[in-house]
Image (spheres, rainbow, N blue to C red):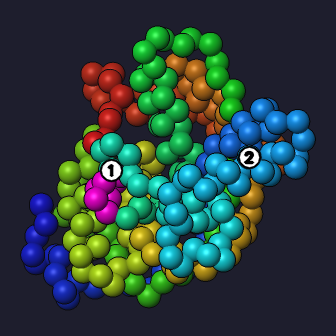
Amino acid sequence: MLDAAIFNDDTPLTNYRETVWRVVESQEEAATLSVVDDINEQSILEALLDDVKPVYRPGTESMHYLLKTAFRYPPLKWGSRFGTRLMPSYYYASELPVTALRECAYYRFLFLQDMQQPYLEPIRSEYCVFSALVASEYCLDLEQGHFASIHDHVSDPSTYQDSQLVGRWAYERGDIELIRFRSARHRNGANLAISEPRAIRSRKPKVQERWLCLTKPQVVSFSSRGAEVSYVFSLSDYCDENGSLMRAG
């Protein structure tokens, strides 16, 4: 899929500067607090747990943990949209909060369907939705017309095959700090795959919000604790023509 006429040393890079959004589950602090007697003991436990986790990437030293954690862990079994298991991790984010939440909803449906025993009761969870300023002169913007022939390939909701080839090429080229691409779950939304911590200019989140999530077999809904905003996503939005959840890998 990698066309030498498109991907080569002369492939154009662009300037990028936007505030982008990411969603993470708020569970670690609550989990450790539940097994200790007070805040001091929790701090000790958190420090002990931190010592056995993978080390942070160079360049993340002064970053808030919400911004640097994505660079800490290797990709999962099938890698990620642009990263194989043999590559450093990407920091994925969305240009709109609704895009980030729509992506998150997909993984909630995936979580339910991967349970060995069907779980039919609603699952309540809490998420942190936060933003950060991203800026770089070395953005591979796959939404530009130069890459029109591959838009659907790199954002295919059912496979990472072509997008990982692009990610590998970008990694080997060496100067690309982030990739901008169309969301596979929100066709009107754009996502980023950030490979270099220096592209994240914020040292801490610009905005940090608490959202509640209710996961059901057919519907995932999010509601903001701080604003009168809510979103509802249906399982059918993520399924193929046969009604099966499209799984990338």
Quarter-of-image position of residue 150 = bottom left
Number of numbered discs present?
A: 2
Circle 2: residue type: Leu
Residue 38 visible in the picture: yes
Q: Which sits in the foreground, 239 or 50?
A: 50
Quarter-of-image position of residue 82 = bottom left
CA gap, disc 1 and disc 2: 30 Å
Element marked by disc 1: loop
Q: Which mark is residue 79?
A: 1
What is the x, y in percent for residue 41? 84, 45
Q: In the image, is residue 74 above or below residue 109? A: below
The residue range painted magenta reads 80-87
Circle 1: residue type: Gly
Q: In the image, is residue 55 above or below residue 99? A: below
Q: Which mark is residue 45?
A: 2
Which of pointers 1 and 2 lies earlier in the amino acid sequence? Answer: 2
Q: Which sits in the foreground, 47 or 203?
A: 47
Residue 229 visible in the picture: no
Residue under the point 48% across and 83% down: 136
Residue under the point 42% across and 15% down: 116
Element marked by disc 2: helix
